[in-house]
Image (cartoon, coloured by chain):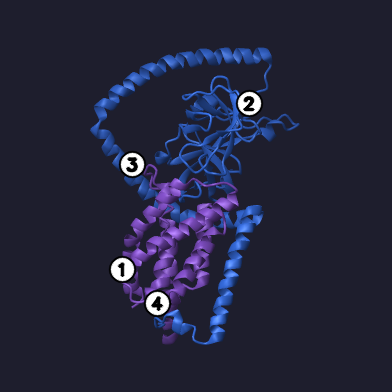
Chain colours: A purple, B blue
Amino acid sequence: MTDTAWTRLDGLARGLSPFALTLAFLMLVAVPLRIPDLSPILPAVGLIAVYYWIVHRPDLMPAWAVFLIGLIEDLLGGGPLGVGPFVLLVLYAAVASQRRVFVGGGFFLLWLIFVPLAAGAFVLSWVFSSLILDQFIAVRPVFFQYLTTVAFYPCLTWVFIQAQRAFLR
Amino acid sequence: MKKATGPVSHLTTPIRAWAHRFAFLILIVAAFALMLLGKADTVLVERARTAVTDAVAPILEIASRPVATVRDVLDQIRELTDLRAENAALRRENQRLRQWQAVAQRLEAENLALRELAQMVPDAGLRFITGRVIGDTGGAFARSVLVNAGARDGVAKNQAAITSEGLAGRVTEVGLRSARVLLITDINSRIPVLVGESRERAILGGDNTGQPKLLYLMPNSEIRPGDRVITSGHGGVFPPDLPVGIVTQASETAMRVQPYIDWAHMEFLRLADYDLPRQLSPSGEVAPAGPPMGALR
């Protein structure tokens, strides 16, 4: 193979790394940890990952990738189908429309913005899941999952920052 | 490598912006289409789900083993610290259980004799497939786990998933090498049960909380906290008499059941192949005999 082909292949692999990393995390949280009462409130890593990448590298997290992540999350989790892609796409649109706010925003500012954005995403998930299931879903676990998601944000973000430094220049 | 450019500069040409918006709109429509498709519960959706779980099953299986090992080591260390107290407790329990064993043996003999007298049709044979819990997908909207046994191991839809403590759930999706077990706490779970000594019929319905509800009870049923809940076998899907849980709350507004199962230690699940149709086959062929029902408890 020529040198340019290798470079292109290398570029492609690097370009796919945000997507692949997100999928890896989706699988990682599915490993049973056997800690009492943890599984219902495991953080929604898809939400954090998509938020991070559409803020920092929107070119590497296009809408179709966001859609796929939501779909795989739904298929893997066994929840109501379609809600995951929809909520993540709404998040995508929200960030894209207010891009000026995010550009140059520091870690704490982005975390601060994530708090209401994640709340909106969980409310939206709750409303649509309840509509699909034709009954009100218990609010408590949803609220606690929201809290763990916000709390887990720095850990995951740290990993993504390292990955961005390592693979994406 | 591509340069990092914001979509603002990306969308400079109007055609490109229009194409982006159009693609986004299509994806949103696709998400809604998926919601409708999922609600219709077609074979297609199930196939997609099993394809994904089958694909990740080998990865999850490898990942779940070290976690289980670490967990076991931690458990052993904790057990070592209160070995003496546990020993004493176990001795007391053993004494009590011996008495129960005597009672059970007497009752079993009596039961057998009475069954013979009444010429009762024997219960369908039970066969067990044991699977390791490899995925606990969590989340606040659904309660299910993945096991590493699938169609090639004889797993089929609607088999009851149990542990030594009691009923855990029901198999809802079967892939080639993995299956999804819908836990009894899931909002979609509905299981016919019998409650208490009066054996009141009810449906155990999950609502994503830790304690599922009893639904469709008779208006003047006498149910008290502490009553045992077992599967009824109505509908022929589940084997009867599997222990489910204990009634913890019995008020006008809600009847709730605390499952026997210890979710945190659910490492393996036994899937009960309750072979009712083969039992009733005209050839009179009886399903392969499993361990006696008493072995479940």
Dot 1 or dot 4, earlier in sequence: 4
Asked where in the image residue B260 lies, by quadrant, the reply is top left
Q: CA distance from mark 1 to mark 2?
A: 63 Å
Question: For residue A160, what is the image quadrant?
Answer: bottom left
Q: Quadrant of the N terminus of chain B?
A: bottom left
Which of the marked residues, 3 or 2, is nearer the chain's N terminus? 3
Query: In the image, what residue type sits under mark 4?
Result: Arg
User: Same chain for marks 3 and 4?
Assistant: no
Disc 2: which residue: B123
Residue in view at x 36 percent, y 50 percent: B66
Tag of residue A107:
1
Q: Chain of mark 2?
A: B
Which numbered circle lies on residue A100?
4
Query: In front here: B10 or A19?
Result: B10
What residue type is disc 2 on? Asp
| Front-most of residues A60 and B222 | B222
Task: Let me know if residue A19 appears in the view.
Answer: yes
| Cα separation between marks 3 and 2 | 37 Å
* Badge 3 element: helix
Q: Specify few, some or many for label 2: CA neighbours under 10 Å numbering under 14, 14-19, or 20 or more.
A: few
- State whether residue A35 is above or below residue A68: above
Q: Secondary structure at mark 4?
A: helix
Q: Chain of mark 3?
A: B
Please name the amino acid that badge 1 sits on.
Phe
Residue A2 can be seen, yes or no: no
* Residue annotated with mark 3: B72
* Labels 1 and 3 within one chain: no
Q: Are marks 1 and 4 in contact (CB under 8 Å)?
A: no
